[in-house]
Amino acid sequence: MNSIFFETIIRVDILIVFATIINYGFSVSVPKKGDLFTVNITMNDFQTTQEDEYAYVQYKLPDEELFIVGYLPLINMNSAHHMLTYACAQPASGDKFWKGGTTCFGEQMIIHGWARNAPSLTLPENVGFHVGRNTPYKYVVVNIHYLSILKNDYSGNQLIMTRKPLTYHAGVMLGGSGRIYLQPKTNSIRTPFSCQYNGPPISIFAVRVHAHQWGRVNSLYRVRKGEISQIVKGDPQWPQSFYPLASPVDIQNNDYVIGQCVYDNTEDRVVTVGSTHRDEMCNVYSMYSYDSTIQSSNRKTMNSPPIQMCWDNAFSSIARLIPADSEIPPLKPPEISGAPSGPHAHSEHGVNTFTADLYTNVEIWPDVKSLPAQLGEVGGIALNNANNELVVFHRGSRNWESKYFDEYRFRNEVYGPIEDDVLIHVDTRTGQTKYRWGAKMFYMPHGLTIDHEGNFWLTDVAMHQVLMFQPNNLTHPALTVGEKFRSGAGSSRLCRPADIAVMKNGDFFVADGYCNSRIIKFNRKGEYLMEWGSSMTRKVDSDGFPLPNEWNIVHSIALNENAQLLCGADRENFRIQCFNLTTGEFLRQIRVEKKDKIGAIYAIEFVPKANGTILFAVTGGVQTSNKKVYMVDASTGDILTSFDSNPHLISPHDITVSANAREIYVGELASSPANALHKFELSKHTDLPTETFNRRFNINDKNFRISVIIMAAFAVPVLASVIIGCIIRIRNLRKTNRLNAFLDDVKSRDTSYNSALGGWMNRRKGFSRLEQYSDGENEPLDTNVGDDSNNNSGNEPITVKVKQQPAALNNKKDTVQFQIAENL
């Protein structure tokens, strides 16, 4: 009875402690009311099975009132034709991911659209899509139209949200037509659509046009009292995002909305409406704001938008007012994105952009006193998130000077390795040095990368090698690429390699940058796979820059597997070049400044653990007067923001970014530890904590303290139960000592009561009782037991008196030989 009681106590306490641990593991850092936060709704290692496949992923909104105020597409046009994001009453499937078919059941509205590497979008101030509690919209569903067969895809959309109530709600009106019939070899085919608006005033502030490859121009107009006004005229072959209007257009009750799509069919077949890239579409999406307090008879519910569709040509006589110049495509502006500046009234909403004070310099970081005095030129830096460390690869007392080299050959016979520990681990919170290593192992440190397994990848431009060290062995490299002190351009030699980027499967890329002007891909064993890149030919393209895939020092590379992107900093050509990481196909080049202000790009890095294409870059070099950090959308080349340090950056050489881009670190070719490292943090008023669809667990200090207190409280009864149980067990053992005393000369003292607790928890082991009873089950007794190996008096078997068995066992003898268990 006592044992059952205490076992029950322990089991209950263990369950409670386990529940406490689970609660601790699932604790999520929740932003304060009114703060912005982000939610990533993405595929999870998705694989298509056919071309033109439609796939869906759902996200259930928390039970609270929320407003969506921005979007950051986590997707690339190399894999997807377009992406639509819906707010739904119910998703069309109970699964998180599904293919084909319907998007939503019940009320739904389109809240965002993307295609052709369109940039991010932020809604005007005080405007947002109202979702969650007190609305019909309890889910968000992302629909992706994939182009081809692919695997390991993590595409999706990032929503920027707030809990702060907003004055104006947002909606999207989809205008277009399904009556598309494009005759072969025919140009200027017009497909009009029209509707009449009935509802409260709305203000259209951004528009997105969509068509497939035959679309020439899409346009939209307002007709009021017989007068026609153009809302937008857009080229569907541009990046397809919601672009802000120069001046928002108001739509009032009884206004007509008309539009059309114009096509040129160059093929020998008829093209009709359809969902694949071999078909066509006619869509004009208008994003608008409205005062939610104004009632409207045509709204399904109080919190649904006043208009969602303007489809087909219901008012063909009005559509005839579309002007003839609607067939002429608009001129592409120098910068498609952007918005009017200055304050705006409700009818003059503009789309926000990132501000220059998005990040601020942390002036009290690092702790300079704890840094080694011999901290020299910083070659590379990388974050070891598992230990909250910034790892710094520096050159100690050595500077990169011409005296160390005969052209590309390091003068090892004169100078030898650096005597100092050239790798230091700095606490990202306190800025204090935690650990050092690497003395007498390196000659001219340069690049550093830490892969997802915590391995350290290093390049030494003097040794012409890439070395990988595992965290449990920092004295001998687990992998080496290149021949020590021997430069070359083949598959087995490198020449001053600058940087490394490592894939999740262990394959890696090397920026063989100073001499060879190439990027090389190796498998996880260090075996050569492919390369691309060439040196300068002195030819230039139309804007005066060198031709694509030509390099003047591949100084830094950055990898984004989700977007299938590998980008490189073409340092002395003042640009970033991006490629398909599987094929090496050139995709685009990015210039972070206008040509007259541009600077050498020294380092780049994607935001890790994110599906988007946000890339950070830092400029440097003596020819760059104002060194800055740039935030770039690599899918479009748009510069989102830039900032400087205080004091100013002097000789930045490398950059690294935390998992959610809250912190940015820059390492310099500094003359002293005081200006070698910089840390930037998101400004408090722009803090965007991330709540991902796959739910990452962010453990905060408050949750940790609460969990520890709960665990400690329940640990006391557990410990007391164990102690009491042990005491009871010991008392029972003492009672049987006299009964078992005669066994001392039969069994040696190596009997394996591993512990009193172990014996108590496993009562079936050992010599627990002498009498054998039947419980009525078919449990025969062993009557053929030989002598024990231990010496008994006279070598006689031990005999034990047995109680009378039931009738089924009456043929058994009254006495049986009992074999002593080995674990007595």
Image (cartoon, helix red, strand yellow):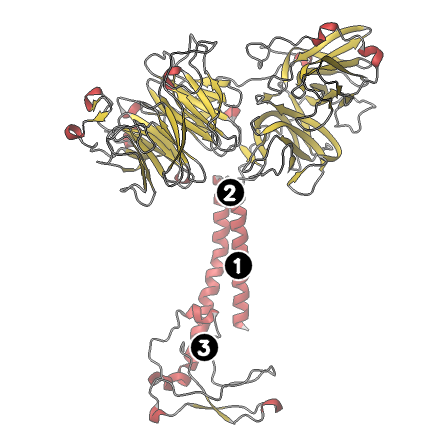
At which x and y percent is residue 402? 21, 20
Specify the amino acid type for callout 1: Asp
Give me the disc on residue 13. 1
Q: Residues within 10 Å of mark 1 (few under 14, many from 20)?
A: many
Residue most extreme to the left: 414
Q: Nearer the viewer, residue 14 or 161?
A: 161
Specify the amino acid type for callout 2: Asn
At numbered mark 3, what does the secondary structure look like: helix, strand or loop?
helix
Q: Viewed as shown, does residue 563 lie left or right of 202?
A: left
Q: Quadrant of residue 736?
A: bottom left
At which x and y percent is residue 29? 53, 37
Query: Which residue is found at the position 72% from the left and 35% from the top?
Result: 102
At numbered mark 2, what does the secondary structure look like: helix, strand or loop?
helix
Q: Viewed as shown, does residue 547 lie left or right of 257?
A: left
Mark 2, residue position: 703
**Image quarter in which the C terminus is found:** bottom left
| Disc 1 + disc 2, Cβ < 8 Å | no
Specify the amino acid type for callout 3: Asn
Sequence-first tag of 2 and 3? 2
Q: Quadrant of residue 622?
A: top left
Give me the disc on residue 178. none
Mark 3, residue position: 732
**Image quarter in which the N terminus is found:** bottom right
Query: Which residue is found at the position 47% from the left and 52% from the top?
Result: 712
Task: Quote the CA–CA distance across marks 3 and 1.
Answer: 25 Å
